[in-house]
Image (cartoon, rainbow, N blue to C red):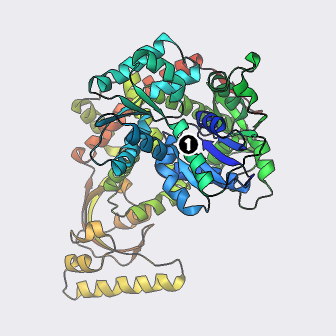
Amino acid sequence: MDDRPVGIFDSGVGGLTVCKAIKDLLPSEDIIYFGDTLRFPYGTRSIDTVIRYSREITDYLVSRDVKMVVVACNTSSAAALDTLKKEYPLPVIGVIEAGARAACTRASGGTIGVIATRATVNSGSYVREIKKLAPTMNVVQQHATIFVSLTEEGWIDDEITRLTARRYLQEMYDGGVRNLILGCTHFPLLKKAITDVYPDMDLIDTGIEIAREVRSILKEKSLENREGRGDIELYAAAFSIFKAQVRVFRRQRFGDKKTGDSRLRAMKRIHYIALFALIVLASSSASYPWEPFDRVIAVVNDRPIVESEVAGRLSRLQQRKNVPRNRLAYERSRLLDRFIEDSIVLQEAEHQSIVVSDEKVTNHIKKLMGRMNISSMDYFKKRVEKAENVPFDEYREDVRKSLITEQVMSLAIGVSPPSRREAMDWYNANKAKLGYEVNVKHILIRPKNASLGEEKRVIAEINALRQRIVGGETFEQIAAAHSEDPGTAKKGGAIGWMSLAELDPYFANQVFRMNDGQLSGAIKSGFGYHLVKFLGKRPVTFDSVEDRIVGMLFQQKLAEQFAKWVVQRRRESEVRIYMEDYVKA
């Protein structure tokens, strides 16, 4: 007998289908459910961010002395489950494993179908789990993101839903799929609509399957509570959004209170608790990691924007420039406007099923590194965090948003890229402003720490290498053997032609003053210390900046049209602002 509660969490309210299934199977078990509606959806987040969010919620559930944790979010199950299992000394289970096991057991043929969000499909988690259990099983996946929107709108038993089901599933059905995993916690709400279209399709409800697994684990580990009241506590990170969204789930899954449905009465008592109350309750726990007393300052179509996000951006803005006190409200308001625009764009991306994977973000960052002639990701991280004054994880999220915005813009607006002639005309008109590019080779030595003694050691090493080159050894041989920039070391230290604007500003300032063939002393930069061989200087050429000019002109065109689109979409959206000192633009 163990009367501690079972902890369940999801990125929103979809996990209530899992909560309901566990309650039906284990009516005496107390449950604590957390819906992270403040940061929903998780599907657009990086893996590292999803792991961080999952840890934070699990920390809270553990502080409430739960006896096991059920990860009712497919995205968290795919990204964070292994991490949570290793880091917490209690049973942690996820919906993906349970769904895969049930599908393999019930499979009537050699093919299993999976419908899920795009993020879950792209993760390949269901495929991996099924292949572990049945290596020869064929798995067919289909992202069905629109199903999520249909459930949130309450269109559960609707002709539009049945038409959408046919569009998503017909190809699967024609290919012989008769066992279908509902790989999102929202999707069990659509079982009737799907069955209306495909009555012989076996629908595998991951909520029901994980409930059976919970029962099995509790029994196996003697953690059952057979005499409990069966209380459910529902916690939400954004109360108004949770309350609005939960109406659909309560009506469809728990029964309408007005009808006296026994399924609802069986829940005994339910608590809706907002984020600030949750933090007050948890404040006695020293391990609880979240910032206290955050509050929603705007809502865009039921998506919240919280005060800490805007405050963080304002703090970084103040570090870059002086903001007079009488301008603080104005600057804060403009930052909020940016968050509102971002929210509108991300919601449009969800509607268009646009997802930017971690791999795409990494490839984009590698392209930026290539332009800056940086080969070390660790060094790039340090440079970004120093220059932008943000954690690298947050920088990655900003890159993701930028790539999503570009895709939304191209789909919503469809601006044609500028021609080479337009780029050449811009170059000729602005040639004098573009400055110079230099051709250099370098040897980089990085200090191991920030001490004065270490700096002296590195400078001495640079001077010793310089003397060896002056004494007759080639720069290229010394660079290949000693430079700590692996990308250029294998090329004899050659950086090649680069504009001064692309180089570290300290480095560029010193190099620009050098003459052809000159060998420098120790030059300090944000990377470390350099020994430089100067090969030449010239005005920036069109070939070296053509791609950037085309990109800039394209972005200008796109930005002009996009600004008009955002204004129109903002008028069409429900935007509620709760910032007390908000100043209209």
Which image quarter is the N terminus in? bottom right
579 relative position to 568: left or right: right
Q: Residue furthest top?
A: 159
Q: Is residue 137 above or below residue 333?
A: below
Of the pair 259 and 520, the residue shown nearer to us: 259
Residue 57 in view: yes
Residue placed at 62% from the left, 46% from the top?
Answer: 313
Which residue is disc 1 drawn over? 212
Location of residue 177 in the rendering, given as x and y in whole percent from the top left corner: 32, 29
Residue 239 image-quadrant placement: top right
Location of residue 501 in the rendering, given as x and y in whole percent from the top left corner: 38, 53
Location of residue 48 in the rendering, given as x and y in whole percent from the top left corner: 50, 53
329 relative position to 364: left or right: right
Of the pair 539 and 194, the residue shown nearer to us: 194
Amino acid marked by disc 1: Arg
Q: Is residue 186 above or below residue 363?
A: above
Location of residue 372 in the rendering, given as x and y in whole percent from the top left corner: 35, 56
Number of numbered tags placed on the structure image: 1
Residue 515 in view: no
Which image quarter is the C terminus in? top right
SS of the residue under disc 1: helix
Residue placed at 73% from the left, 16% from the top?
Answer: 259
Q: Is residue 540 above or below residue 171?
A: below
Residue placed at 69% from the left, 40% from the top?
Answer: 237
Of the pair 299 and 190, the residue shown nearer to us: 190
Residue placed at 39% from the left, 67% from the top?
Answer: 510
Label 1 crowd (10 A; few <14 / some 14-19 / many >=20): some
50 relative position to 122: left or right: right
Of the pair 15 and 80, the residue shown nearer to us: 15
